[in-house]
């Protein structure tokens, strides 16, 4: 791509920064317009009393779609795998959570029948058909409940029964097989790494600039039009709609997040807990990633239309049972009643028509989930813009 080709990338979340870096590497003259004061969107981290905290728990899949793409861009996420094991909370009790496929054979959380059924379901070479409800329908209830909890933790989706079984088993295998990284310096380090690569390749990034419309040959901003030969819209579906694109409406994946910085963990061995009887998650990230202190994420997975009243008190009461005394150790606390993790449910593929020369990178355009999905979408939008230029110059 020639450097006289101007590309505007709208949005400086992960998708936009990936698209910008890829386009700049291909030789385009790239300008990123971000309406916020900071880069990173949902992948930003904030700092409290010297401790870095992600906006809700964030973990990067080691075998997900993002890793190879980041590698081609010259970005290597640094971090460590959290321990495999932890706890399951069920009916007021904590049970040891198996730490890998092998330990599912001995876990006290399952009956003997449940153990065998769970191993069979996860390891079967046959792709399950239909939805998760049908897939798990024939399994003993304890095995089905554990698989539901594992699907929740690898997708953030709830309820999981209506989701496509084959897709969710694939995501489970990505999660259980390769594990995740808790990123050193939080996800902000990934955002900063992408920014540095984009700028090193010549991209210019502007913050505080909202794109308010599309015009032939460019975009509109409050200070006037900006020319571009191609535009990548790396913004969530509601922003795409405001820009005039026809985006199908789907139910978002949402979560209520209680993010805590503590002086110390009152019960140090309880670092990771999944709810079996309730869609809940707890994990301490600062002891694995270099975040500067103890960072505890406590979260409830929200059904699409579930009310949010009462959830915060429920999470605190749950935490009282797992980490009694946490209130005395509190340094910082933030609660978000309904963060949008992904704007569409897994498997709800969004087909978004765009005008000539406009390319979209957003949630739900491919089968990869979460950051894997948008990083893939960002790379694919950049590739489509590059291909269009190659074809135009050949013609
Ligand atoms: C609580 C929570 C937990 C998560 N956990 C995980 C996890 O563990 N693993 C994982 O892989 N993923 C996780 N995710 C998902 C991951 O954070 C997102 O997939 C990813 O950050 C989305 O990036 P994006 O660039 O597509 O969108 P965004 O991050 O939403 O970025 C879009 C950017 O566009 C800007 N913008 C919007 N409209 C305009 C406009 N008109 N003009 C200019 N700029 C505009 C916004 O300000 C924003 O900066 C989680 C998300 C949440 C909320």
Image (tube, rainbow, N blue to C red):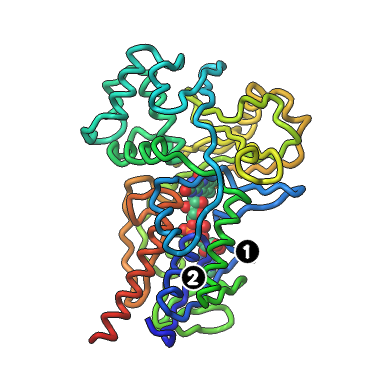
**Left or right placement of residue 183 versus residue 252 in this view:** right
The location of residue 2, given as percent across then percent down, is 39, 84
**Left or right placement of residue 322 versus residue 128 in this view:** right
Q: Which residue is mark 2?
A: 10
Q: Which residue is mark 1?
A: 38
Which structural element holds mark 1?
A: loop
* Residue at 50% in and 74% down: 201
The location of residue 189, given as percent across then percent down, is 59, 56
Crowding at dot 1, Cα within 10 Å, few <14 / some 14-19 / many 20+, comes out as: few
Q: Does residue 330 sit above or below 373 in this rendering?
A: above
Is the C-beta separation of discs 2 and 1 under 8 Å?
no
Establish whether ligand 1 lies closer than 8 Å to the Cβ of label 1: yes
Residue 315 shows in the view? yes
* Residue at 63% in and 39% down: 258
**Left or right placement of residue 304 versus residue 56 in this view:** left
Q: Which residue is most to the top? A: 112
Residue 216 shows in the view? no
Which structural element holds mark 2?
A: strand
Q: CA distance from mark 2 to mark 1?
A: 14 Å
* Residue at 56% in and 38% down: 308
Which numbered disc flags the more N-terminal residue, 2 or 1? 2
Task: Say which quarter of the image contains residue 61.
Answer: top left
Circle number at residue 180: none
* Residue at 62% in and 71% down: 208
The location of residue 307, given as percent across then percent down, is 52, 38
Q: Does residue 248 sit above or below 269 in this rendering?
A: below
Establish whether ligand 1 lies closer than 8 Å to the Cβ of label 2: yes
């Amino acid at each position: 791509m020639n450097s006289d080709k101007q590309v505007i990338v709208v949005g400086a979340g992960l998708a936009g920064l990936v698209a910008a870096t890829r386009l700049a590497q291909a030789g385009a003259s790239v300008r990123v317009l971000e309406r916020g004061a900071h880069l990173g969107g949902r992948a930003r981290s904030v700092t409290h009393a010297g401790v870095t905290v992600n906006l809700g728990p964030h973990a990067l899949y080691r075998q997900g779609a993002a890793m190879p793409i980041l590698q081609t861009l010259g970005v290597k996420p640094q971090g460590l795998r959290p321990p495999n094991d932890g706890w399951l909370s069920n009916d007021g009790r904590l049970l040891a959570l198996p730490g890998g496929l092998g330990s599912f054979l001995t876990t006290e959380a399952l009956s003997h029948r449940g153990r065998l059924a769970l191993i069979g379901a996860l390891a079967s070479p046959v792709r399950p058909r239909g939805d998760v409800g049908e897939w798990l329908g024939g399994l003993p209830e304890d095995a089905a409940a554990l698989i539901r909890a594992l699907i929740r933790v690898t997708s953030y989706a709830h309820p999981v029964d209506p989701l496509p079984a084959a897709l969710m088993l694939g995501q489970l295998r990505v999660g259980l097989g390769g594990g995740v990284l808790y990123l050193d310096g939080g996800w902000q380090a990934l955002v900063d790494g992408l920014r540095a690569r984009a700028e090193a390749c010549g991209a210019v990034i502007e913050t505080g600039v909202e794109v308010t419309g599309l015009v032939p040959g460019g975009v509109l901003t409050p200070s006037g039009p900006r020319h571009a030969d191609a535009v990548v819209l790396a913004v969530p579906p509601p922003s795409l709609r405001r820009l005039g694109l026809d985006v199908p409406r789907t139910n978002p994946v949402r979560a209520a997040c209680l993010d805590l910085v503590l002086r110390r963990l009152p019960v140090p061995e309880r670092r990771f807990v999944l709810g079996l009887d309730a869609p809940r998650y707890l994990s301490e990230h600062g002891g694995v990633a270099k975040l500067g202190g103890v960072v505890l994420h406590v979260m409830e997975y929200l059904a699409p239309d579930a009310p949010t009243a009462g959830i915060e008190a429920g999470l605190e009461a749950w935490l009282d049972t797992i980490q009694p005394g946490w209130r005395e150790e509190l340094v910082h606390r933030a609660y978000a009643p309904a963060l949008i993790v992904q704007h569409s449910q897994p498997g709800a593929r969004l087909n978004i028509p765009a005008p000539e020369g406009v390319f979209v990178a957003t949630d739900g355009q491919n089968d990869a989930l979460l950051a894997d999905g948008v990083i893939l979408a960002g790379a694919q939008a950049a590739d489509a813009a590059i291909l269009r230029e190659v074809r135009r110059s050949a013609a």
